[in-house]
Amino acid sequence: MIIMPLGDILQRELNINPSEFSVLVSAYPLAAFLSSLFGVFFLDKFDRKKALVIAYTGFILGTASSALIPTTADHTLNYYLFIVTRVATGLFGGILGALVLSIVGDIFPLARRGSAMGMVTMAFSLAAVMGVPLSLYLVNQFDGNWHLPFYFVSGPGFFIILLSLFGVPSMRDHLTNQQQRPHPFETIRVAARSSNQQQALLLMILLILGQFTVIPFITPYMINNVGLTQDEIPLIYLIGGACTVISSPLVGKLVDRFGRKKVFYGMATLSMAPLLLVTHLWPISLYIVLTISGSFFIFISGRMIPANTMLTSVVKPENRGGFMSLNSSGRSLAGGAASLITGAIVTQDYEGAPLEHFGIVGVMACGFTLLAMYLAYGLVEGK
């Protein structure tokens, strides 16, 4: 959410092409993939609160390090330093993703877990509503200084660390069943042998591929192909985030009322129309762009709520942290791969020229979505 809206600015300021930008975007999720995979071996051995505080502290320090990258004329050096700081941030961010889902799965019974996932998703939407537009506004007001969003995120983050230390209760219930917990290698072996767990993991990977092949290049596409200005880009995230702040809790309630699979099928089906539209736009009215991008955010986030709820139900609570870390690893790998895939497909002849072949990416994203819907059909849920 920090890097992707800055796509056009970063390509200019760092003198990089779309392919190199895709590497920068993928640095975080690929690092998160490694840390999440490692998290399988230790996340279920610690108090969830302690793990949360440590992971979040590392995440904030990594984000702050991106803000301190020098503004020298050596663009190549800055680019590689940027990749290093994003890798450092991703190493902690990958563990955070697994922890959040594990905590929700531990605290909320399956009958109310959809609503809980809706609230978690709404938190991400609030970040889009408040953080992204304000960060982009600051960048636009201070002559394209792309360091400001990283200060904006890491500054309040240190205060949130204190809130986590003193406001979040200890969470140790999952430690009471130590005798029932398999060795971490067994978590991987069970997942490798269980077709149900494999389907759940692959389902999430496909959903991530079905959105993060598109999202990183929305900003450059809107500027170079649709004709939006850099000052108008924050509106996409402001409107999209505001829409999902309203829709996410509603989707969560629908999940609890009508069932996870029914809501997932509905949201996944509806998400394909904006996926195609947002990757095939031409110069049109800003209001139409905002309507399409708003629906894009609603349905993309909407399909993740029932999917995450289903995912937490395929594994026992005492093994949930390890499994969710394995899931986070797969999601991070998919996110990094998605950006690299798009970077290999999308081309730009020169700075300011229209992006080519983005429509192919939209069709491909719909294909990933259809495969995810097929896998969801045979998924067996527990509690």
Image (spheres, rainbow, N blue to C red):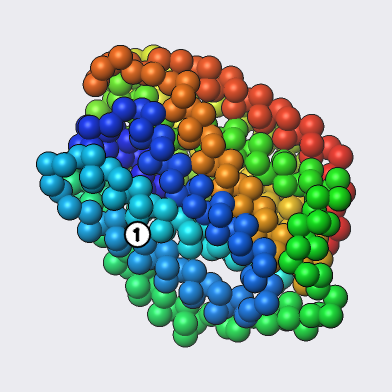
Which quarter of the picture shows residue 63? bottom left
| Depicted 164 relative to depicted 248: above or below | below
Whether residue 81 sits left or right of residue 122 in the image: it is left
Which residue does the numbered mark 1 point to in the structure image? Answer: 63
| Depicted 275 relative to depicted 30: above or below | above
Residue sitting nearer the eye, 237 or 148: 148
* Residue 109 can be seen, yes or no: no
| Depicted 45 relative to depicted 270: above or below | below
Residue occupying image coordinates x 23% and y 39%: 76
Label 1 secondary element: helix
Residue occupying image coordinates x 74% and y 53%: 311
Whether residue 170 sits left or right of residue 215 in the image: it is right
The C terminus sits in image quarter: bottom right
The location of residue 263, given as percent across then percent down, is 73, 42
Residue sitting nearer the eye, 71 or 183: 183
Which quarter of the picture shows residue 101? bottom right
The location of residue 192, given as percent across then percent down, is 81, 50
| Depicted 266 relative to depicted 123: above or below | above
The location of residue 256, given as percent across then percent down, is 75, 54
* Residue 367 can be seen, yes or no: yes
Residue occupying image coordinates x 81% and y 56%: 189
At label 1, which amino acid type do we have?
Thr
Q: Residues within 10 Å of mark 1 (few under 14, many from 20)?
A: many
Residue occupying image coordinates x 30% and y 14%: 349
